[in-house]
Image (tube, rainbow, N blue to C red):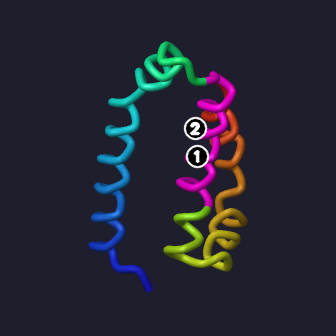
Amino acid sequence: MLTARFLHVLGVVCGVAAGACLGVAEAPTKLVTLGLSPFLISLCMVSGVLVARWTLPVILKGTTDILLDLRERAHLIVWAILAESP
């Protein structure tokens, strides 16, 4: 079972990672000016979101815990979808 201290450290690490992601928000613009396709950049960004929001939690907790969390907090799925929309 995950301890409260582990979850706290995990939350702090996730917060720092989110801050780093926001800090590099200008990177896609710079990559387009270098000549890379905007579609390729978008694909890479979406792939990163998939890894961060599905693959890493599954590695850390397993699919059973993830599905249980989704069942217990189904009302939050709407907010997650709204957060992803531009």
Q: Quadrant of residue 59?
A: bottom right
In this view, the residue in front, 28 or 52, is 28
The secondary structure that most of the magenta stretch takes on is: helix
In the image, farthest residue toward the front? 35
Q: Position of residue 71 (x, y in %)?
A: 72, 66
State the quadrant of the C terminus.
top right
Q: Quadrant of residue 5?
A: bottom left
* Mark closer to the observer (2, 1): 2
Provide the secondary structure element on which disc 2 rests: helix
User: Which amino acid type is shown beneath numbered disc 1?
Assistant: Val
Q: How many marks?
A: 2
Identify the residue position indicated by label 2 in the image.
45
In the image, farthest residue toward the bottom? 1
State the quadrant of the N terminus.
bottom left
- Residues marked 2 and 1 touching at CB (< 8 Å): yes
Q: Position of residue 83 (x, y in %)?
A: 61, 34
In this view, the residue in front, 35 or 54, is 35
Crowd rating for badge 2 (residues with CA inside 10 Å; few <14, some 14–19, many 20+): few
User: Which amino acid type is shown beneath numbered disc 2?
Assistant: Met
Work out whether 74 lies above or below 26.
below
What segment carries the magenta color?
A: 37-54
Identify the residue position indicated by label 1 in the image.
49
